[in-house]
Image (cartoon, rainbow, N blue to C red):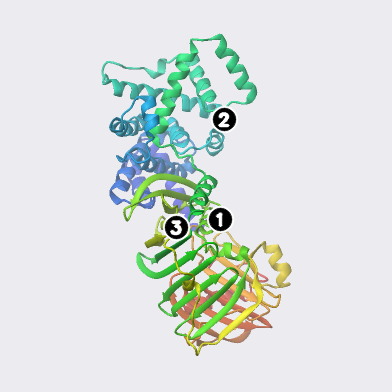
């Protein structure tokens, strides 16, 4: 990734501070701390959503960074290194310092001979002991025994042999097992163990036991081990002890093993029993911490009837009803009603069904279940989705699913700077009420004439490559050149009559919401709300003076919206910009077919 001169100097400065701090320079460490602390605190707050716990996590992480800084070989990897330490501290707080007993399997507790109250105390003790492990061992335990990451993935992530992963994991588990046994027996001072003197052969055998128990051996390795096991009956007792310890460890950690596919399977099993639902949702966007909220009221009846009512501050009351493949929208203030047909694939892309919307959310992201919390008195599964951004931190999405119905209750989107940009909260949720079918018949005032566009069916939006964009739009499409500082997503929308329109969304890396949306095509495709009188605008485009119309919408995702046409092609541009900023962008678009553009 190309860095600006300012960013390059900052990287050089941090690398020099790391080098000096590794040599014991306290002034350099304090300067490094001043650089890292605010970023680490934002990261912890975004993940924990609790300022006090976030400060605890960062304090622990900074102590660990100071203790282990000398072990960092690649100074250039410092940023990723400290972020990982903060992440580990957060997960330990999330999983090991909870005192609730939700989710404990009583059958397993009886099997390992531990009472619920004892298990809660032992979980706190495990968190304490984990802090004592060497950082490389701690990291692999958190990955494997807490987050459920495979050994192969851990090896690839850390660029180490899988044998090294197994060795670190085995030694870490030996320490944890010893400390927890001592803790349960209450003889901490009487039983000591010098880990440096542990027989390497015994340690290798322990690693072999764990590989066998967790089925990470190949078929041939497993066959050889079972032959050796038959020859060494004394191994049976030790193997059983390790099995019991793994059961205890994973019960304590609440090992996160649900994949996105497994979560979706559970959701679909439960939602198959839902005949209808009603919900009121508040959708809030944040800009510099200032919220803007839209409220919507929606109803669903199986298998495919929807109704949604919302009020936009500029456009007024909007009602949309979907029955099968037909959708009718009504804008009350504009006295406009439009009927269209949509394909099943297009409905899935719209995310009308919340299982479809969850699939869209999970695309290209890693998901982790973080445990059970309570939202408005409902037990909810807390999921976290992480999407890596090159050169930046992760973009984080938090989702709370009602554990009885598996419906989303709260969704939060954070950017890579760990600032909250959008929150969606279900304020009311009612299921299986026996909603009347009449609810999904939109009765319009007698003076409203419906614009019938059902002669064509809206097809799913097609994803395109840049090469395909140029082939479909001709020699000079008006595009931002995709550079290091912006990312483009190209989509093709088939319009009634067969013509297509290119929709391009431009993202600043690290922001989950599109910064700019540009459309262009050979047919008029802008549907301006008639109740909002547009402002006429004259400006230069592609060396020609054109006349356009501008609408000010005022909400962060689309503050302004500009429409114009040029050389038999129709255009719209909108996003997180006012009119002046949009005109500056359009001026650059005029040469985008022949020269690269820096950034939006």
- Determine which of the numbered discs, if any, sits on residue 449 in the image: none
What percent of the width, then of the height, locates residue 522? Answer: 68, 79
Real-space CA distance between mark 3 and mark 1, rounded to the nearest whole angstrom: 21 Å
Q: Is residue 598 visible?
A: no
The residue mark sitting in front, 2 or 1, is: 2
Which one is earlier in the sequence, the residue at label 3 or at label 1? 1
Residue occupying image coordinates x 73% and y 68%: 471
Residue occupying image coordinates x 47% and y 40%: 75
Residue occupying image coordinates x 34% and y 46%: 33
Question: Which residue is identified by label 3?
Answer: 415
Q: Which one is nearer the viewer's eye here, 4 or 563?
A: 563
Secondary structure of residue under mark 3: loop
Q: Is residue 250 visible?
A: yes
- Which of the 4 image quarters holds residue 116? top left
In the image, taking residue 169 as reference, residue 326 lies left or right, namely right
Classify 10 Å Cα crowding around label 1: few (below 14), some (14-19), many (20 and above).
few
* Residue 492 vertical placement versus 571 (above, below): above
* Residue 442 vertical placement versus 375 (above, below): below
* Residue 369 vertical placement versus 219 (above, below): below
Real-space CA distance between mark 2 and mark 1, rounded to the nearest whole angstrom: 31 Å
Q: Which one is nearer the viewer's eye here, 310 or 475?
A: 310
The residue mark sitting in front, 3 or 1, is: 3
- Determine which of the numbered discs, if any, sits on residue 2 in the image: 1
What percent of the width, then of the height, locates residue 268? Answer: 52, 51
Secondary structure of residue under mark 1: loop
- Determine which of the numbered discs, if any, sits on residue 161 in the image: 2
Secondary structure of residue under mark 2: loop
Real-space CA distance between mark 3 and mark 2, rounded to the nearest whole angstrom: 33 Å
Which one is earlier in the sequence, the residue at label 3 or at label 2? 2
Classify 10 Å Cα crowding around label 3: few (below 14), some (14-19), many (20 and above).
many
Across the whole image, how many numbered discs are drawn on residues?
A: 3
């Amino acid at each position: 990734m190309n860095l600006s001169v300012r960013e390059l100097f900052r990287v050089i400065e941090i690398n020099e501070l790391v080098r000096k701090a590794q040599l014991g320079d306290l002034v350099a460490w304090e300067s490094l701390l001043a650089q890292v602390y605010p970023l680490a605190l934002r990261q912890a707050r975004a993940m924990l959503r609790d300022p006090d716990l976030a400060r605890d996590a960062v304090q622990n992480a900074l102590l660990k960074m100071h203790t282990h800084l000398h072990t960092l070989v690649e100074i250039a990897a410092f940023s990723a290194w400290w972020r990982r330490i903060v992440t580990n501290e957060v997960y330990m707080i999330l999983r090991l310092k909870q005192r609730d007993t939700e989710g404990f399997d009583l059958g397993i507790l009886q099997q390992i001979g531990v009472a619920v109250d004892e298990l809660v105390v032992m979980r706190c003790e495990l968190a304490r002991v984990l802090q004592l492990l060497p950082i490389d061992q701690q990291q692999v335990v958190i990955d494997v025994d807490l987050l459920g990451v495979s050994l192969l993935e851990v090896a690839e992530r850390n660029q180490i042999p899988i044998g090294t992963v197994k060795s670190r994991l085995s030694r870490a588990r030996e320490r944890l097992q010893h400390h927890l046994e001592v803790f349960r027996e209450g003889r901490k001072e009487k039983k000591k163990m010098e880990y440096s003197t542990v027989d390497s052969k015994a340690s290798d055998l322990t690693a072999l036991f764990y590989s066998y128990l967790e089925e990470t051996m190949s078929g041939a390795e497993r066959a050889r081990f079972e032959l050796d096991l038959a020859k060494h009956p004394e191994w049976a007792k030790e193997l059983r002890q390790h099995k019991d310890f793994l059961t205890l460890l994973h019960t304590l950690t609440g090992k996160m093993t649900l994949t996105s596919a497994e979560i979706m399977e559970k959701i679909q099993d439960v939602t198959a029993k839902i005949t209808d639902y009603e919900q009121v949702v508040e959708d809030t966007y944040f800009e510099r911490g200032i919220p803007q909220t839209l409220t919507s009221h929606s109803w669903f009846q199986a298998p495919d009837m929807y109704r949604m009512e919302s009020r936009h501050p500029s456009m007024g009351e909007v009602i949309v009803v979907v029955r099968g493949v037909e959708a009718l929208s009504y804008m009350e203030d504009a006295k406009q009603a439009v009927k269209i047909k949509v394909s099943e694939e297009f409905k899935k892309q719209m995310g009308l069904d919340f299982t479809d919307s969850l699939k869209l959310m999970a695309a290209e992201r890693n998901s982790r279940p973080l445990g059970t919390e309570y939202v408005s008195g409902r037990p909810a599964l807390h999921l976290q989705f992480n999407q890596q951004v090159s050169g930046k931190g992760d973009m984080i999405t938090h989702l709370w699913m009602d554990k009885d119905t598996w419906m989303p209750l709260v969704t939060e989107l954070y950017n890579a700077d760990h600032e909250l940009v959008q929150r969606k909260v279900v304020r009311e949720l009612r299921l299986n009420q026996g909603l009347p079918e009449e609810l999904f018949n939109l009765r319009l005032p007698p003076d409203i004439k419906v614009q019938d566009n059902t002669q064509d069916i809206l097809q799913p939006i097609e994803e395109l490559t840049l090469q395909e964009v140029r082939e479909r739009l001709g020699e000079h499409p008006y595009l931002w050149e995709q550079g290091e500082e912006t990312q483009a997503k190209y989509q093709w929308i088939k319009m009634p009559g067969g013509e297509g329109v290119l929709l391009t969304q431009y993202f600043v890396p690290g922001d989950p919401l599109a910064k700019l949306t540009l459309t262009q095509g050979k047919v008029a495709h802008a549907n301006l709300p008639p109740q909002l009188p547009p402002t006429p605008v004259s400006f230069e485009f592609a060396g020609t003076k054109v006349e356009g119309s501008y609408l000010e919408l005022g909400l962060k995702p689309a503050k302004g919206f500009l429409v114009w046409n040029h050389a038999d092609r129709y255009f719209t541009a909108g996003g997180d910009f006012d009119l002046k900023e949009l005109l500056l962008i359009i001026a650059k678009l005029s040469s985008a077919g022949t020269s690269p553009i820096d950034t939006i």
